[in-house]
Amino acid sequence: MAAADSSLFTLHSSHFKEQALEAGFSACGIAQARPVDEVTANSYRQWLAQGGHANMNYLADNVDKRLDPTLLLPGAQSIVVVALNYTPASQLPDGEYQLAAYALGHDYHDVLKARLRQLAAQCLPADAGTKLAVDTVPILERYWAWQAGVGFLGRNHQLIIPGAGSMFFLGEIVTTAIFDSYDAPQPSRCGTCHRCIDACPTGALESMLDAKKCLSYQTIENRGALDESVKDKLGTTIYGCDRCQQACPWNKGAKPTDIPELQPSESLLNMTRDDWHQLTLEQYQQLFRGSAVKRAKYEGLMRNIRAVEGGNEDLQQRKGKEIDHSSGHSQQGGVETV
């Protein structure tokens, strides 16, 4: 949309937030549009320089816009941030292959953007300049959710909403409209807790976020072979990883989402290991029509499935050897020796 003279618009932030909650969003906050703070800008540039983004080269594109959202929209004055709960109401059966919770339902890009577009149309003046962002626009969404008072930034690099947890999709409306009040950032409430760091099986959170070590990066964004160091760390998960979130105390007792589009289909819930191993391209396309899982593509998902199966077999073999070693016995030629 074309930018407009922002001085024409002064909106009531409290009314806008009420409308956002009525539209089904879990939380809403508003921040003034301006460049990110110097500490964040320097940290982001350093993270890129150290290769923390692995092969996700798009994160190194448009850095100027990522660090200054006013470059996304001429005359931008405000950034509205909304959160949409995706805490799963239904899980895949224990013992079967697992997907990250965010990917169980329909593609969040479509679900969130449709609601965000409707909110903007209902609550912003028709001639206000707007730019909608749902994970595909160069903007530091968790930073702006923090600036807009929606939650605080946790040690697992997720936005945490006190009392509700971290399983939320984030969306932004960058606009030329001015609001009568803006929200303030929330202080961190992680305290001395480091359960997320301890729960990460690859150490991806130990210093800076190392995407190459992250199982979500390896199983979704990585287009090549999986790193050998992560194969036996996958457990039963064939797409993404939720371990740092599952370990977070703020997610204990989080309210499951009641949004129909984010619920897993019966077909997905009924998948068995044999079904996964025999999955054809046609079945994959049908099972994940309109799903974020298509990000990994068929070849990537099948690569993950083979790795999980092989990694579990290798792990069991090593555990067997450790048990034999710890008992002080070994098996040679079928004869037990001490």
Image (cartoon, grey):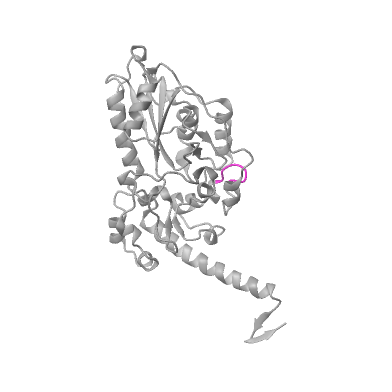
Q: In the picture provided, is 206 more to the left or to the right than 20?
A: right
Q: In the picture provided, is 134 more to the left or to the right than 192?
A: left
Q: In the picture provided, is 75 more to the left or to the right than 196?
A: left
Decide: is 131 above or below 221: above
**Residue 63 seen in the current view:** no
Q: Could you tell me which quadrant the C terminus lies in?
A: bottom right
Q: In the picture provided, is 124 more to the left or to the right than 36?
A: left
**Residue 224 seen in the current view:** yes
Q: Residue at x 35, y 24 (%)?
A: 16
Spot occupied by residue 188 in the image (x, y as percentages of width and height)? 57, 33
Residue 182 or 218: which is nearer the viewer? 182
Spot occupied by residue 288 in the image (x, y as percentages of width and height)? 32, 54
The answer to whether residue 278 is magenta is no
Residue 326: image quadrant is bottom right
Counting every numbered tag in the picture gives 0
- Residue placed furthest toward the front: 253
The answer to whether residue 206 is magenta is yes
Q: Residue at x 47, y 23 (%)?
A: 183
Residue 6: image quadrant is top left
Spot occupied by residue 234 in the image (x, y as percentages of width and height)? 51, 58
Magenta residues span 205-210
Residue 6 or 12: which is nearer the viewer? 12
Decide: is 3 above or below 297: above
Decide: is 262 above or below 307: above
Task: Name the chief secondary structure element in magenta.
Answer: loop
Spot occupied by residue 30 in the image (x, y as percentages of width and height)? 43, 25
Residue 145 or 75: which is nearer the viewer? 145
Q: Residue at x 33, y 62 (%)?
A: 270
Q: Could you tell me which quadrant the N terminus lies in?
A: top left
